[in-house]
Image (cartoon, grey):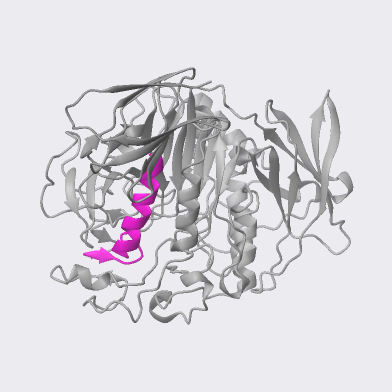
């Protein structure tokens, strides 16, 4: 790290007002601020459809301290109050902890400019300031920084990440899960997360979704909210801790997100948050891929040793675990993705954010070599394919975490590479590394930088094409370096660049403790990886429709519908004025061009051969 960034990192740590415990363990990380002026720990926000939602997290308040809290913005160099609320004291239902947070909601927000804001509490003694950024619609490239797995094996500050993110200056932050590994102790862990990352969160929109460890479980098959007995690591499905605890974790981490697509709670009144957020013309679907997933206990009969979730018999019957009726995303979220994928107003590109990826990409987890892990989204296979087939209809890239292993994968359902690309980012603190260690080299390799790229089947028989992976140090993927969570453990984070003009997506995978501003800064081998937007629906055409020559509008939305089945094949905002729609069966199709009130609908458009050339001119008003 160069001298300037070292100074920045030190300043970031000191600016928190206190030198916090640097130990990797112990109890001193449970810091409780007593100085009233520092009682606001951090704040996070999003703006969607001119609605600002901002949450503030406080340290526990004393009985005599005011619960009134206010949001102010600076207009013409004068602070003006735009919202007020009360500090929430809802109980977590575990350890007598309380929430100590609040949500501000401001409608008709002016998203065309930056705004200085401050949260004011304790009768003005406590303030916390940041920037609510304007919507970056004028930027050619939208940049997302993405993280996962903030293990409690290293509770220190993260000055290397903070300095790098400030230098890379992303438009959006995405924390995909496991911000807390402290099971029943979310509040102090969440406050520590705020001290670690608040410096970058306060000045840019942030998406933070909880995963299994956040809600107090080693694994999570949510099973639509049923009560788990904890059997076999909660493999019976459902939530182990009280509903109030789960809901308070979700409120703390997700209340700043746009309103849910369908806010109806699941069983036992557990809340949901799946929704979408448009940042500068890139539309992000935020899904809950654990919440509706079926638990495998009692369903999966394959031999798998001591743990029901880990299959280690290479000769097991893969089809036997694809149990009829087993859910992954659930019908509600499939409906959401189907609806979201057809809405393109103000949208250039689309992306799906989830807790983990739709495949099992690790052959070694911890000390064990495994064939298949039912905690991954490679299972159940039918639900996995259903999700990928819906996601590809909007040509969506996918970003996730959880696997502790950085990967870029082109997913396949019926054929290799017929769906979209995913980027799974490595853990911030990778104390439990996983490795991509196939026994043979893949077909059709795609990289000279790495040995094991190309077409493979995962342990469930799912098709995947590996483009890049970041194994922990060691030629065989051994994890003897697990006491070094930065270097040997392959820790890091991701940067994703959506180029709206070129319609490309570039995934960058950065190791920890690398100064990204240094001339010799290097990503993990095999990165960056750049894909074209249309590669996210890689299914090969059986035929085409005549090429569309569209007049009157550049980059219009095009939707293709198979008239025999009434299925929407895909919807995309095209690049330019010419588009040759691919189709997957001969027949007649409906094509909709444009959006809003300016739409042309062509019916009965007949498919033509792969090598035929024909053009239809379409005039939009």
Percent coordinates x, y for residue 314 in the rendering: 15, 67
Of 243 and 417, the residue lying toward us: 417
Percent coordinates x, y for residue 396 in the rendering: 40, 41
**Where is 151 relative to 453, above or below?**
below
Image point (67%, 42%), residue name:
16
Region of the chain picked out in magenta, as a range: 371-397
- 471 with respect to 355 (left or right): left
Percent coordinates x, y for residue 49 in the rendering: 65, 39
Percent coordinates x, y for residue 595 in the rendering: 53, 32
Image point (58%, 43%), residue name:
206
Query: Is residue 393 covered in magenta?
Result: yes
- 45 with respect to 79 (left or right): left
Of 137 and 210, the residue lying toward us: 137
Of 367 and 337, the residue lying toward us: 337
Task: Answer with the quarter of the image where residue 198 lies.
Answer: top right
**Can I make out residue 483 in this image?**
no
Task: Answer with the quarter of the image where residue 270 lies.
Answer: bottom right
**Where is 222 relative to 390, above or below?**
below
Query: Is residue 383 covered in magenta?
Result: yes
């Amino acid at each position: 790290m160069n001298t300037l960034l070292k100074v920045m990192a030190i300043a970031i740590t000191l600016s928190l007002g206190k030198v916090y415990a640097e130990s990797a363990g112990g109890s001193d990380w449970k810091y409780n601020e007593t100085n009233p002026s520092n009682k606001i720990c951090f704040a996070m926000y999003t703006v969607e459809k001119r609605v600002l939602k901002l949450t503030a997290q406080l340290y526990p308040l004393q009985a005599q301290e005011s619960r009134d809290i206010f949001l102010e913005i600076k207009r013409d160099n004068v602070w003006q109050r735009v919202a007020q609320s009360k500090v929430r004291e809802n109980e977590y239902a575990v350890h007598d902890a309380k929430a100590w947070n609040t949500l501000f909601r401001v409608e008709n927000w002016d998203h065309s400019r930056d705004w200085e804001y401050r949260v004011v509490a304790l009768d003005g003694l406590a303030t916390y300031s940041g920037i609510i950024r304007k919507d970056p619609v004028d930027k050619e490239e939208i940049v997302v920084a993405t993280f996962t797995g903030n293990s409690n094996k290293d509770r220190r500050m993260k000055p290397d990440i903070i300095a790098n993110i400030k230098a890379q200056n992303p438009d959006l932050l995405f924390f995909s899960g496991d911000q807390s590994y402290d099971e029943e102790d979310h509040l102090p862990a969440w406050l520590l997360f705020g001290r670690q990352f608040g410096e970058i969160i306060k000045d840019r929109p942030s998406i933070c979704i909880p995963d299994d460890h956040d809600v107090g479980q080693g694994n999570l098959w949510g099973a639509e909210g049923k009560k788990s007995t904890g059997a076999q690591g909660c493999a019976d499905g459902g939530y182990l801790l009280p509903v109030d605890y789960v809901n308070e974790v979700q409120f703390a981490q997700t209340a700043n997100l746009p309103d849910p697509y369908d806010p109806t709670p699941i069983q036992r009144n557990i809340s949901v948050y799946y929704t979408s957020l448009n940042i500068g013309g890139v539309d992000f679907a935020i899904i809950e891929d654990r919440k509706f997933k079926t638990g495998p206990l009692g369903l999966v009969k394959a031999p798998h040793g001591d743990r029901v979730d880990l299959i280690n018999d290479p000769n097991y019957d893969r089809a036997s675990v694809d149990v009829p009726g087993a859910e992954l995303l659930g019908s509600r979220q499939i409906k959401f993705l189907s609806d979201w994928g057809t809405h393109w107003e103000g949208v250039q590109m689309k992306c799906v954010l989830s807790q983990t990826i739709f495949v099992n990409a690790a052959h070694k987890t911890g000390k064990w070599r495994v064939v298949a892990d039912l905690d991954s989204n490679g299972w159940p296979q039918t639900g996995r394919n259903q999700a990928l087939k819906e996601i590809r209809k909007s040509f969506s890239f996918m970003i996730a975490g959880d696997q502790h292993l950085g990967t870029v994968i082109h997913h396949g359902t019926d054929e290799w590479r017929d769906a979209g690309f995913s980027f799974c980012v490595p853990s911030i603190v990778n104390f439990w590394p996983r490795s991509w260690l196939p026994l043979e080299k893949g077909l059709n390799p795609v990289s000279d930088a790495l040995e094991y790229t190309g077409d493979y089947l995962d342990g469930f028989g799912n098709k995947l094409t590996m483009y890049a992976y970041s194994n922990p140090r060691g030629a065989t993927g051994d994890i003897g370096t697990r006491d070094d969570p930065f270097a040997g453990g392959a820790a890091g984070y991701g940067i994703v660049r959506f180029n709206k003009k070129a319609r490309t997506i570039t995934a960058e995978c950065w190791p920890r403790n690398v100064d990204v501003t240094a001339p010799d800064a290097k990503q993990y081998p095999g990165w960056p990886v750049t894909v074209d937007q249309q590669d996210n629906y890689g299914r090969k055409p059986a035929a085409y429709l005549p090429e569309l020559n569209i007049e009157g509008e550049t980059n219009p939305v095009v939707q293709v519908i198979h008239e025999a089945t009434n299925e929407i094949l895909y919807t995309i905002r095209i690049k330019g004025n010419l588009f040759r729609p691919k189709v997957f069966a001969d027949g007649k199709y409906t094509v909709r061009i444009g959006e809003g009130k300016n739409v042309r609908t062509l019916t009965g458009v007949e498919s033509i051969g792969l090598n035929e050339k024909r053009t239809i001119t379409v005039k939009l008003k």
